[in-house]
Amino acid sequence: MGKTAVFVLSVLHLMEKEETKHITALVLTHTRELAYQILEEFNRFTKYLPHIKAKVVYGGVPVVHDKKELGDPPQILIGTPGRVLHLVNEGIVSFKYVKHFILDECDQMLEQLDMRNDVQKIFKNTPHNKQVMMYSATLSDDIRGVCKRFMHNPQEVYINDQAKLTLDGLQQYYVNLSETQKNRKLVNLLDTLEFNQVVIFVSTVDRAKALNALLESEKFPSICTYGRMDQDQRIEKYKTFKKFGSRIMVATNLFGRGVDFERVNVVFNYDMPNDEDTYLHRVGRAGRFGTKGLAISFVSSEDDRLIMEKVRAKFVVKLPELPDSLDASTYS
């Protein structure tokens, strides 16, 4: 939906003529990969603003490395809440001069109690007159109330029609099958579909590892990523897939929100998500910014069928059964 471009360009516009050696913009997000992606976007748009620097911090990297990097403070700091709070508590960073406070995918941070507490503590270390911007594609009424506690007289920009949250260029289908039939069906589809890149979502780390091993044994160019992976490996996997170094990524919900891979045109829900909003975010990895894409969901239980019905009702999509053949021009 272009949220990243909105806050990156807004912040840079507001900072364009500022000459300062202090952190004046703080961006928080819920995953390390998304923090890294946001850094890349700031770097891309600051090409003609050489006096503005952005840096990123997140867990899994030695604190001594962050301390060295932040010895020369950037104007923009991007990070995950846990690491940012650690740096505040150690006195490595100060937010005394922060004017712009951005929470990307704010619902993900504020729904998790530990992360919410970290965000609140960081918030208290920033000036009272700062500008606060919060971004999310979906927001429950409960979390909307939490968001407003961070703000004074907030302005809310939202899509009132839930049907508009679907992607026009995205073909969505389901396959009714048993759990034991999933692997064979997936391999057959990967053999027949015309894809640039594929993301396959599974429910657990163990299933991600096992499915990736299966695909590798079948000679598919597959890699996998998940939350418990070493940080250097996680960022390396992200870079590899982003640069088209691999065409298939098996992932948990780690890559279900925010991250942008422009070449992905096919998404599989090998395991159905637990709710309809997660479904929307997952399939949204394909067919982005008006391009074409294909989403296929495997339905193997009554719970899966219930989620599918909720998706149909909330987003007003047909979600028919996958036909025997597809016209490649409709998704690539």
Image (cartoon, helix red, strand yellow):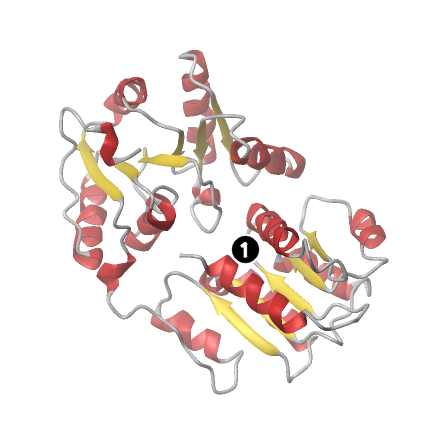
Tell me the amino acid under the disc marked 1: His
Question: Is 321 above or below relative to 221?
Answer: below
Query: Residue 282 in the image: x percent, y percent?
Result: 36, 45
Query: Residue 31 in the image: x percent, y percent?
Result: 56, 50
Q: Which residue is mark 1?
A: 30
Q: Is residue 193 left or right of residue 288?
A: left
- The image quadrant that residue 145 belongs to is bottom left
Which image quarter is the C terminus in?
top left
Badge 1 marks a residue whose secondary structure is: loop
Q: Is residue 180 left or right of residue 73?
A: left
Question: Is 88 above or below relative to 290?
Answer: below
Task: Please state which of residues 153 and 42 is positioned toward the viewer in this rendering.
Answer: 42
Q: Residue furthest bottom?
A: 153
Task: Please state which of residues 135 and 274 is positioned toward the viewer in this rendering.
Answer: 135
Query: Residue 328 in the image: x percent, y percent?
Result: 24, 28
Task: Please state which of residues 276 and 137 is positioned toward the viewer in this rendering.
Answer: 137
At x 37%, y 66%, the residue is 139
Q: Is residue 201 visible?
A: no
At x 61%, y 63%, the residue is 27
- The image quadrant that residue 125 belongs to is bottom right
Q: Residue furthest front?
A: 48
Q: Is residue 314 visible?
A: yes
Q: Is residue 19 left or right of residue 219?
A: right
Which image quarter is the N terminus in?
bottom left
Which class describes the residues within 10 Å of circle 1: few (<14), some (14-19), or many (20+)?
Answer: many
